Image (cartoon, coloured by chain):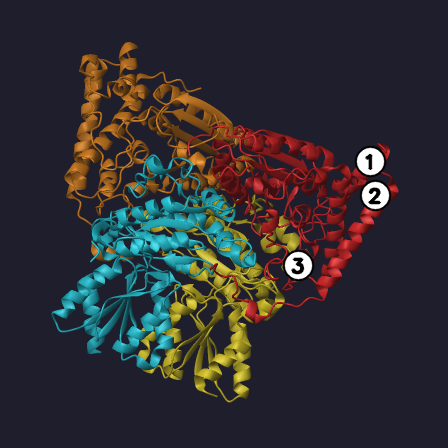
Amino acid sequence: MARAKAVKSQKAVPNKAAGSPLALYRTMATIRAFEETVQRLFLGGHIPGLVHLYMGQEAVAAGVIAELAQTDFIGSHHRGHGHCVAKGGDLDKLFAELLGKRAGYGLGRGGSMHIFDPANGNLGTTGIVGGSVPLAAGAALTAKLRKTGQVAVSFFGDGVLNQGIMFEAMNMAAIWQLPVLFVCENNGFGEFTSIDDVTAGKDIADRGKAFAIPSEHVDGMDVLAVQKAARTAVARARDGKGPSFLICSTWRFSGHHVGDKQDYKEDAETKAWRKRDPIAQLARKLVAKKQATQKQLDAIADEAKSAVTKAAEAARKLESPTPADLMEHLYAE
Amino acid sequence: MPEIVSREARLSLLERMLLMRRFEEAVIHAAAKHKYIGRNHLYIGHEGTGAAVMAQLKPGDLAHTTHRNHGHIVGRGADPGRALAEIMGREGGLCGGRGGTWHMTDTSVGFQSTSAMVGGSIGLATGGGFACKQLGQGNVSVALFGDGVLDEGISYEAFNFASQYSLPILFMCENNEKPGRRETSMLAADRLLDIPKALKIHTMTVDGGDVEAVHAAVGEALARIRKDQVPVFIESQIEAWPGSHQHKPEFTTGETDISMAWDTGKITGPHADWIRQEPILRYVRKLLAEKAAAQADIEALDKKVQAKMAKARDFAEASPFPQAEGAILGAFA
Amino acid sequence: MPSEKMLTVKDAILEALFEEMARDDRVCIIGEDVGVAGGVFGQTKGLFEKFGEARVVDTPISEPAIFGMTVGAAMAGLRPVVEVMFGDFITLVMDQLVNQAAKIHYMSAGGYTVPLVLRTAVGVGGNLGPQHSQSFHAWVAHVPGLKVVMPQSPADAKGLMKAAIRDNNPVVFIEDRTTYNVKGPIPDGDVIVPLGKANVVREGRDVTIVAVSRMVQIATKAADILAGEGIAVEIVDPRCIVPLDRETILASVRKTSRALVLDAGHLDYGITGEIAAIISEQAFDYLDAPVARLAAPNVLIPCNTALEPLIVPNEQQIAQKIREMLNA
Amino acid sequence: MTEKTFAQAMFDALSISMEQDPTISVFGASSFVLGRGLPPADEKAFIAKYTTRLLDPPVSENVLASVGVGSATAGLRPFINFGTSSFAFEAHNQIVNEAGNARYMSGGQLKVPLVYHMFHGIRGIGGAQHSQSPQSMYANCPGLEVVLPATPADAKGLMRTAIRSDNPTLFITHTKLLATKGEVPDGDYAIPFAKGEVKRAGKDVTIVAMSLMVLEALKAADQLKALGIDAEVVDPRTVVPFDAKVVIDSVKKTGRLVILEEASLVCSVASEIAAIVAEQAFEALKGPIIRVGRPHVPMPYSPSLEAFCTPDAAKLVDAVRKLLKK
């Protein structure tokens, strides 16, 4: 395929209701409740392995995914529960997977870092830094070649900024004008290392701009700002005008993984970020603009919590896979 | 910075270029005579860049190069007879005939490695730069590579690494992409320089056909690298030799006739345009015009180089193939 | 009788690509120089002209991302054939191959399929040196979730490529460049050679040779030499090393009681060790002699004209080994 | 002799090496040193002492592997920690095509004195990507040395050899070994490569195992003893170069061989050992060579399935009993 030409493809229709401020609030509240429950279950010894929580970053998943249709693709990362929930993942199946139960998305064989939800276009969480970036670009390539009108979003953390594969994927997305959004969730840390210690250059956006990809910084704690930026970028992708690069500054409230003591982070910094909690921030705005009452919002949060709790409790009672499930799906028919 | 003023320095630069050219011509002769001498990527047309770099490296400086390496190695002072023997797979070769054209090394002149993997040398040179810095003897590491390397993710990783750790590295990109021809690299960036720039590396562009211009740029870069312990990226724009894509090398543009510099009527044929601008003839014209040398000086210099190459050819032809049992030695120290 | 035409291995695979692309518009070709240039070995010649740039995609030199994108494209509904120019460059795509492609169908409990063919050329010969002559078939065989095809004859190459493209799994299709110009008959029509079915290419009672890919051809020469000495060699071509047709191999060894395993890749920790271990475990009581192996010595592959021929076992070495096995 | 953990023993070897040789730099230092069970004071002192020689590079495994080769050929002795072996897949090109090739291709002019450290194995809910044991892949590539220590004493002695070696060495350890304890000789000592060790003598059957599997094999040997089976446990310790003699000598004595392997069996280290013994000790064998390894599937996450897949003492005991018909 030679260098790109803009080819408009048929539209896929995003779910408008999903993008309303109250819907955004519901999505974020659900993610928060989900992660709080995961944390509790983990500390109670019910979740094996390591889990990486999305608390603090909810605005990014909620804001971007609100602009997508169900058939659009997302590629997630190791801190991916928020994306799975926002993309319409089934809470029962998500908890089942995290708890290693047979009813999970992957028969409980994948766990937190291997959640795939094809019905909702979720290309999967992954345990490899940068692993899903080319997957999303590849899904975008399919969308372009097959003229399906789908868009793909690649979510990745700031650690991926130094992986060559991200540049390679950006380069190809730019030459071929693929309908893909590169969404960097910059929470300041790759595992336990500060981004400033390992990332050269004065502006991350320059890395996208070098390929002539429209690149912008977005306040990742403000879901409305994220949504607005995503809307422009998704429209650009659907119009055949190629990729965009959004850098959402955000903060992980719970460290790299549950149990991480976060010695390397400064308390004052975390406190300052907590004041900008994306959920509380949206609530303040909605109440101030009289778009919702606190009571309404509380009701939404309570509903989210009880839905999550119900799913989690149900999942705990489910059965583990048996050795008969071991070889299943190793190869496709 | 080092404008070349002395006549000796200028003639020495020309001699280096001539040696690089006559060496490749010897390779073409050898390829016609012997069935297998590997797949050679010839350096013809690049001499203006290689000579300017090699002339300014100091003892202890490190160089890392790619599959298009012959010019670099002989330009740096490796014995041309042993280099040719290596290409011909002989025991007397620089690496005992094990490396061949793609893997020539001569540590005695600071030539670390030649890698036939696209992107192979750039990471190695970064490691060399790290060693130079740690060992603290004021040396620099040079990476010589083609524009295709910018397609490879490792180049970004290397730029980031070099920039972040302030390593003394000259990234010397020999860009021989020809407008209008199929791209040798497929890069979305409008200018190669945008990529290292995004990673906060000082960049320069230079006309690779003008050896003194390259000399000045490299001189400035090396001074900066040694003084500030930082990487610098130079893009040298080179008019590709029309024969450079052939696996079986041929005299596509004829065997070099130095008198074409003053007897331009001799320049004919389909590739006359390339010959007119090629760096050696161009430099000779400049030296003559500026009265730095007379025709007789130039001819004498060329004769000297040709005599050196004749000896080199004799050495290589006389060198035996390695003993068969040699194949299984040497993998481990 | 149907008329059979003669094609080289390279053209047989190309014919399979033409037929499969015409049959199914989800099949596309992705790789470096596969389009306008027609492949560095001419192995994709004419596809670009026939199917256009939307289905024959030239890429930058970015193997890790090319391959990763192919995985994503396959998940989203294409059936790509992605070319990794030299087998050595598998090292560049290992992460996406092992950590993504091989695992996604399993980890998604069948939710996603990854129907792709990773096509690559290997082969010792041609003085290409240690970074352009290696074969990592043992690596990919070691990774659960991948299928690994290693054809040697034109008819097999075509039929196996068609099977690989129609398979719903990531298939690593390893072609030996030294077989590219080998000519052979091609059956007419849409003939599929199923993955995981070995072929007894020559029958014999005295000794079994299990030969991978090009070694079948060298083994055949050795068998001809030995036939003159009254030794009847049976040659089994596994055709795929994953899935490996153990039954055909074991049945042959149970008949002959002797086995020699041949590979052009490295001996140490390679496929010959695996096949020898299987035979030693499962046909132990039938064996009259130790299972022998011949493969490339544990050394880098020199490009040198004098040294390179020492890497791949030749027919004389094979014949000699078999004589030793029968005299032991 | 002092009782130490595996992690402390590795750290000892690193400390001694860095003290003796100023050209050693550690990349990925934090994840190698921190949180591995060292006394916090030791950790701090070590980090303070070597600030310029301990680096935490960007998440760029590919260039990191290459920086290792480049700096090794230029005179340093880099020690590169990838952490989990799954991340090293991103660097396979550099490890195989550059590190493994450099010396041979330069006709011996270059040496590549570098160590790549990584964790392999089923660490416990690492899932499909973080439970891998890639040692046979590296062993399949000429030019690389591959070391798989099982005990604290071996870890220290082999690591000294790895760091001093002028070849690129893959030093592959197991997360589950880090906290295991054993007697470690004091001071400086080195254990040569290609020198396996009989970890337990026996006469009825030879069990070959490496890394964590040695511990399982010893457990199994205890259980077999109770059943009247006297098992010999052999640990080759290094995969490349490989000590075939120690294995063959044992098989000649016992006549039977079972190999315990943590990786998937297809093209595994166990397969190679089986093939070597089948060829070189055929006459001595009284029964087929049995390999016990993980099934050929991506490692599942669910604890029930992971346990089912993990090769251990119980599975080994079953295999030995079946072989000996006891």
Looking at the picture, which amino acid does disc 3 mark?
A: Leu
Q: Position of residue C269 (x, y in %)?
A: 38, 63
Rendered shade, chain A: red
Structural distance between the alpha carbons of marks 1 and 2: 9 Å
Instruction: Place residue B15 in its image quadrant.
Output: top left
Rendered shade, chain B: orange
Looking at the picture, which amino acid does disc 1 mark?
A: Leu
Tag 3, which chain?
Answer: A
Residue pointed to by mark 1: A286
Classify the position of the N terminus of chain D by image quarter.
bottom right
**Whether marks 3 and 2 lie on the same chain:** yes
Camera-nearest residue between C88 and D298: D298
Structural distance between the alpha carbons of marks 3 and 1: 33 Å
Image position of C171 with respect to D184: above or below: above
Cβ–Cβ below 8 Å for labels 3 and 1? Answer: no
Cβ–Cβ below 8 Å for labels 1 and 2? Answer: yes
Q: Earlier in the sequence, mark 1 or mark 2?
A: 1
Q: Residues within 10 Å of mark 3 (few under 14, many from 20)?
A: many
Looking at the picture, which amino acid does disc 2 mark?
A: Leu
Q: Residue A98 — which label?
A: 3
Q: Residues within 10 Å of mark 2 (few under 14, many from 20)?
A: some
Instruction: Place residue B140 in its image quadrant.
Output: top left
Tell me if D65 is positioned left or right of C276 in this view.
Answer: right
Rendered shade, chain C: cyan
Output the letter for the chain in yellow. Answer: D
